Each structure stands twice: as C-alpha cells, then as structure tokens.
Image: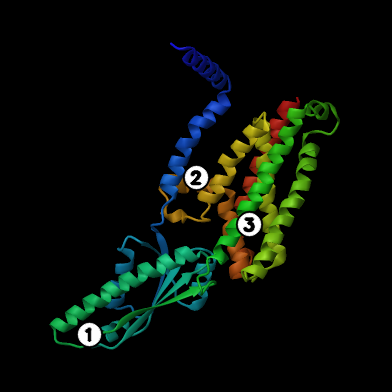
Amino acid sequence: MTAVARKIRAVATKELHQIARDRRTLLILLFVPAFFLLVYGYALNFDLRNISLAVQDNDRSSASRELISAFINSGYFDYAGDVSNSQEISRAVDRGEARAVLVIPARFGADASSGRPSRVQLIVNGDNANTATTVVGYALGIVTAISTRYELQARQLGAVPPGLTLEPRVWYNPELRSALFLVPGLIAYIAMLTAVVSTALSVVREKEVGTMEQVRMSPIGPLAYVLGKTAPYFAISLTASVVVILLSMVLFDLPMRGSWVALLAAISLFLVGALAFGVLISTIAESQQVAFQVGLLTSLLPTLMLSGFIFPIASMPPVLQVVTYVVPARYFLVTLRGILLKGVGPEAWWPQALAMAVFATVILSLASLRLRRQWA
C-alpha cells in the first residue's frame, strides 16, 4: 500500500468513527433519501382520482342515469350526493363536499332520443386551477364518448344523431389563473418557513452560546420564556403574510372576497401552531444545523408536498392521505382559499379552524412539557 493510500485510509477511518459518534447526523443521512423517495414517488402524482361529484338530475330518465353512471364508473369521480337547487350547489362547493356538480336539464332524455341538441352543465370549484382544468378535461372526455355512442346508434337506425355537449362553468377562478391558487400556498409556505425555522434556531442558539443555563436559573419560567421567544417571530411572520397578500392583490389581482378579520384570525391560528412546532424542535435539537434539518424535513416539505398546495390529496395513496391529517397547512389552505377566493364565512371553514386549534394546542403542550422537564 502506497503512502497516499494509507493517508486516505486513515482519514476515511477517522471520518467513519466521527459519523458513527454523531448518530443524529447518520440517521438524517440515511433517512433523507428514503423519505424523499416515498414522498416524491407517491405524492408526485398528477393523475387525479376520487373527484367528489354532486348531481342535480332534473330529468330523472334512463338517459340521465346512464350519464351519471358514466361519470361514476369512469374511475375519476366519486358520487357525493344529490342537490336540488342552486343554494345546495353553493353550499356543497363552498364547504368542499363536492369538487364538481353535474347539472342535467329537464327533457334531457327526450331530447337525446329525438335527435334534438342537449347540453349538460358542469360546475367546477376553481380554487385550484390545475385540478379544475383536469376535472373539466375528464368530463369533456366522458361526454364526448357518450355523444359518439349516441351518434353511432342514431346512424344505425337512420335517425338524426343528437348533439350532446358539455358546458363547463368554473367558479371563483373563471380564467383558471394559476396565481390565484398558488398564492395561498405560498403564504402557508412562507409562514411555516419564518415561524418554524426562525423559532427553532433562536432557542437552539441559546444552547450553543451557553446562555440557556442562565435562563434556566432565572425566575422566568418555561411558559413566559416560550411566549417571550415566540412573540417577536409571531409579529414578523404575521407581517410577512399580510405583505405577501397585499403584494399579490397588486401584482396578481388576488381577490379579497371575505373578511379581513377572519383572514388575520386564520393566519394567527396557523402561526401559533407553527411557532409551537419550532419550539418543540428546539427541545430536541442540540445545534442549529440539526434544528434546521429537522425543521426542513418535518414542516417545510410536508407543507409543500402533503398539504394539497401542488398535488391533490385525493390522488395520493391512502397511507399518505392519512398522514396529511397531521399537516396543519392542509387545513390552512382550505380556510385561506375559502376566505380569499370564495368569500365564505365561518360556517364553511370552522372544521379547518378547529383542526388548526387542536394542532396548536397539542404541539404547544408537548413543547411546554419537554421544556419543563429540561428545566427541572
């Protein structure tokens, strides 16, 4: 063995011992590739499935039932129930009970059998432009296939083929502008970034510079320490979120159809949970590097990948869909889009607000408990 090879082996052996002693870094190095593979491999799916579809059947004929069956049996749509009027349609779409509503006119079956033109309407929730575009595309394909079959049957019988067409109507974002659904997701992403990482690094910094022991010996107490540490970052994160919204209104024509009070309350509730999560991370990490890595893996990536920001939750595997229930950005995005784009009140988004409150309470309790044990 040459001298160079012995030197390389010595350095490599020393580095292996160093990595073995730093088990947290070793765990991150081994866990990150597998985590990325699972998240990107399963969540990165642009094929939309399980689209909730409500139906207003004003005809109640065999032809209308055939059309409904074609939608449900296509593999893209799930039956979400019947609606009978425009008020029920608005309620189903606003509350997220239905992503789309199929409206079949009266005399649909009679027009189809007599060769008269017939038009069915599809109302689509446009708060997510990519999803709405996909839904309209699926519906057009289904209606076109049925229309083609009607034409073939009519020609075989020597009758006039009916003209069956689909009239899509996109609510809340008729132009299907991507900015209107990306901006709320960016608000959640920025809020999570400024809240979780900054709070975690701030507390861990106290450990690294050695001032944490002084804080422990002071009569401040864990609760006052947590509130004092997080209050400045709460103000900064809230300001950053409001600035993003105002800039989006100026630059991208983002509408504000709801209440500013409700919007600020929703952002504040989300930030409390994010700040508490940052404090919880700080009780686990011993260095700013570890705190940053843990914060990235446990908050920023789930916010980007598992919240419905970019990829529809309905298209994810059942296991990942269950995981999304512990991602607070999932509920925040629904609330944010409901207030900004739809202008709905608390009756539409209170379940999401309740979920964010539960998350904030649980995480804040865990963080306080761990701090209390470390201070004991």
Q: Amino acid at mark 3?
A: Ile
Q: Which mark is residue 21?
A: none
Q: Residues within 10 Å of mark 1 (few under 14, many from 20)?
A: many
Q: Amino acid at mark 2?
A: Val
* Residue identified by numbered label 3: 187
* Residue identified by numbered label 1: 161
18 on left or right of 368: left
In the rendered image, residue 335, in percent from the top left (x then y), is placed at 60, 60
Measure the alpha-carbon separation of dots 1 and 3. 51 Å
- Residue at (17%, 79%) from the top-left corner? 153
- Residue at (68%, 56%) from the top-left corner? 267
Quadrant assignment for the C terminus: top right
Indicate the quadrant where residue 243 lies.
Answer: bottom right
Residue 306 in sight here: no
221 on left or right of 118: right
* Residue identified by numbered label 2: 323
Where disc 1 sits, the SS reads loop
Q: Nearer the viewer, mark 1 or mark 3?
A: 3
Q: Amino acid at mark 1?
A: Pro
Q: Is residue 164 above or below residue 271?
A: below
* Residue nearest the viewer, comparing 181 with 99: 181
Q: Is residue 149 above or below residue 21?
A: below
366 on left or right of 212: left
Where disc 3 sits, the SS reads helix
